[in-house]
Image (cartoon, helix red, strand yellow):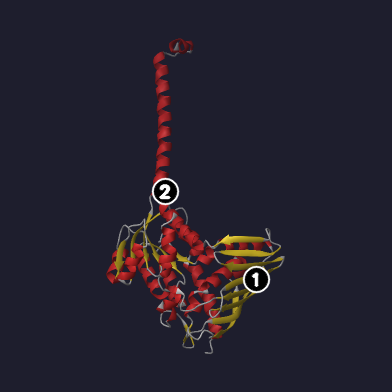
Amino acid sequence: RSSSRVTRGRNTSPIKFNTRARRARQRKNRRMAATKGSQEGTQEGIRTPMRCAILGGGTFAQNTYVPILEGDLWKFSKIAVDAVWSRSEETAKTLSLSMWHNKAEVHFGDAGLDAIIGSDSIEAVFIVLPPRPALEITLRCLRAGKHVLGEKPVGTNVEEIEAAIREHVGMGQWRPIWGIAENYRFEETYEVVSKLVSSLGGVITLSLNASCALSDSSPYWHTPWRHSTVELPEVDGIGIGYLFEGPVHFMAAIRKILGQEACLGARVTASATLMQQNRELKQHDTISGYLRFDTDAGSSCACAVNICYAAFKPRVQFVITCRRGNIVIERVPGKYVISGDGVEPLIQEIPFNGVDREISYFIDAVRKHKGREAPVEDLEGECSAREALLDVQHLLALFRSASTS
């Protein structure tokens, strides 16, 4: 039957028909093979985890980083923790034992750090250390070609931070990713509020009242570096460790809420006063002041800043006055509550998710870096060291204005 149909065509034969059919089948098979290969390649890219190390084994690394890195990021093969390091052997072992899925090698001391930095298999590191040693170790890792996500603050001295950024930029177009884990900039709440502010015509005034309860029952009280005037800045010979290390979060939140139009290139005026109210802390624990932003376009906004580490109970609240409405953000256990007039819906509740989002952002940036999908500046985006430097500069401006010298 096949032959009879072929012979109706002009200058055709059963042999020629079979040849055409065979070639058509071959083309179809090649297309299917190419599609399958592409899919397998994509799946292989997804299955290949980013091999990393955690440098630092303190409270935040154990209580926050480990649960995130052991969760969906491990489950969906986005990350594998191959090594952990701490300055002490005991802390490094404790960090390793806190992980169920990742079988991380334990390293400690100078030799252990050298081993991780020199490892060809580790492509990225999470640095969860005090800011002064963290900046030095960050540069060593970047020089070795490793991507870095370091905890905030980016450093304690503006000149040292600027020098580090210049060195990083000088490493070339496809230098390693350097991110700073400022989770407030990645909290969904501040992203939502930033968009609301824009829709309401921009900020006229912002008021932050952060009442933070701190005593020796807190695990963060028992970290000597937070009490140190060597590891962290001081004002007039008195430490400001807790007012520097924690409130840099609030500077990131304020800048995120105000948005690029209000902050970028703005002249910033600062005025503040410092107090000691928590006698057991033996350092400045309260700052009260304001920041005023003035742009060349003629827009201005003022931010009142009150941060206290001598409060009886914790409470954090932002009150934002916009041109066409008002917004209130309140931090309560486990979530933020957004309310106000001119805001739809009137009340929103958003859970804390900044650390999860910033780590996922960093992992995605490293993946895109491998494929050369975008310039390093774009990949770093809001987790860049430049953004973190601006957070530090705004906070230090308040401290400088409060200094008697």
**Camera-nearest label, 2 or 1:** 1
Task: Check the image and report above or below for 256 versus 393.
Answer: above
How crowded pointer 2 is (Cα within 10 Å; few <14, some 14-19, many 20+) is rated as some
Q: Amino acid at mark 1?
A: Val
Using the rendered image of the protein, determine whether residue 157 is visible from the camera's viewpoint: yes
Which quadrant holds the N terminus?
top left
- Mark number displayed over residue 402: none
Residue 190 occupies which quadrant of the picture? Answer: bottom right
The reply, left or right, for residue 58 in relation to residue 108 is right
The reply, left or right, for residue 323 in relation to residue 45 is right
Task: Check the image and report above or below for 35 versus 106.
Answer: above
Task: Check the image and report above or below for 83 versus 298.
Answer: above
Q: Nearer the viewer, residue 87 or 3?
A: 87
Q: Position of residue 350 (x, y in %)?
A: 58, 60
**Mark 2, residue position:** 46
Q: Nearer the viewer, residue 199 or 112?
A: 112
Task: Check the image and report above or below for 235 versus 39.
Answer: below
Residue 270 occupies which quadrant of the picture? Answer: bottom right
Identity of the residue drawn at 49% across and 81% down: 240
Q: Amino acid at mark 2?
A: Ile
How crowded pointer 1 is (Cα within 10 Å; few <14, some 14-19, many 20+) is rated as some
- Mark number displayed over residue 319: 1
Query: Which residue is outermost to the front?
Result: 217
Q: Which element type, helix, strand or loop, lies under badge 1? A: strand
Query: Which residue is outermost to the left?
Result: 111
Q: Which element type, helix, strand or loop, lies under badge 2? A: helix
Q: Position of residue 314 (x, y in %)?
A: 56, 74
Total marks placed: 2
Identity of the residue drawn at 41% across and 68% down: 128
